Image (tube, rainbow, N blue to C red):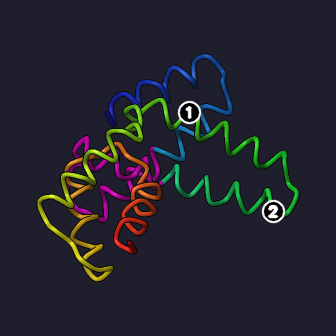
Amino acid sequence: MFEKINEDLKSALKSGDKFKLSVLRMLKSALQLEEKNKKEVLTDSDVLVVLKRQVKQRNDSAREYESLGKLETVEELKKEIEIINTYLPEEASIEQINKTIDDAFNKLNPTNMKEMGTVMKYVTENLTNADMTKVSAIVKERLSK
């Protein structure tokens, strides 16, 4: 996956797409930093973690800028997210999320909020392409019943 980003970076450079080039350079930089910190070559799952982190940071920033009324910056961040999302697998549907949470509850039988971490760990291990904010909200709701 890292190679695909490098290839796309080269093609953006050749085509003169400055915006995409800047986004891909930021991604490459984040990936290289992660590789340096880990002191090993990144696997595709490591790359996915970094890409998801980049999307999350941009979503958080977009919400902040939106509250400040800086809509131009919000649009730019959304375009950056679109570019990053092309490298991420399709997000899990709400049905897939609910099924995995059901499996976790059936297997782990959690009874209180203290066990949320074990449920989240199970879901994370079994559903790599889900929005964990949604997952967390659903798990909290079910545990509070």
**Secondary structure mostly seen in the magenta stretch:** helix
Please tell me in which quadrant of the rendered image residue 19 appears.
Answer: top right
Identify the residue at image location x=33%, y=79%: 113
Instruction: Decide: is 7 above or below 84.
Output: above
Left or right relative to 71: residue 111? left
| Residue that numbered label 2 is attached to | 67
Looking at numbered disc 2 in the image, what kind of residue is underneath it? Answer: Ser
| Residue that numbered label 1 is attached to | 83
**Front of the two marks 1 and 2:** 2
| Residue closest to the eye, 121 or 40 | 121
| Residue closest to the eye, 126 or 53 | 126
Tag on residue 99?
none
Residues rendered magenta in the picture: 28-53
Among all residues in the image, which is located at the extreme right? 69
Looking at numbered disc 1 in the image, what kind of residue is underneath it? Answer: Ile
**Residue 6 coordinates in the image, percent (x, y):** 41, 31
Left or right relative to 12: residue 145? left
Please tell me in which quadrant of the rendered image residue 12 appears.
Answer: top right
Quarter containing the N terminus: top left
- Label 2: how many Cα within 10 Å (few below 14, some 14–19, many 20+): few
First in sequence: mark 1 vs mark 2 = 2
Quarter containing the C terminus: bottom left
Instruction: Decide: is 120 above or below 59.
Output: below
**Residue 76 coordinates in the image, percent (x, y):** 73, 42
**Residue 98 coordinates in the image, percent (x, y):** 33, 47
Please say whether residue 3 is one of the residues in the magenta stretch.
no
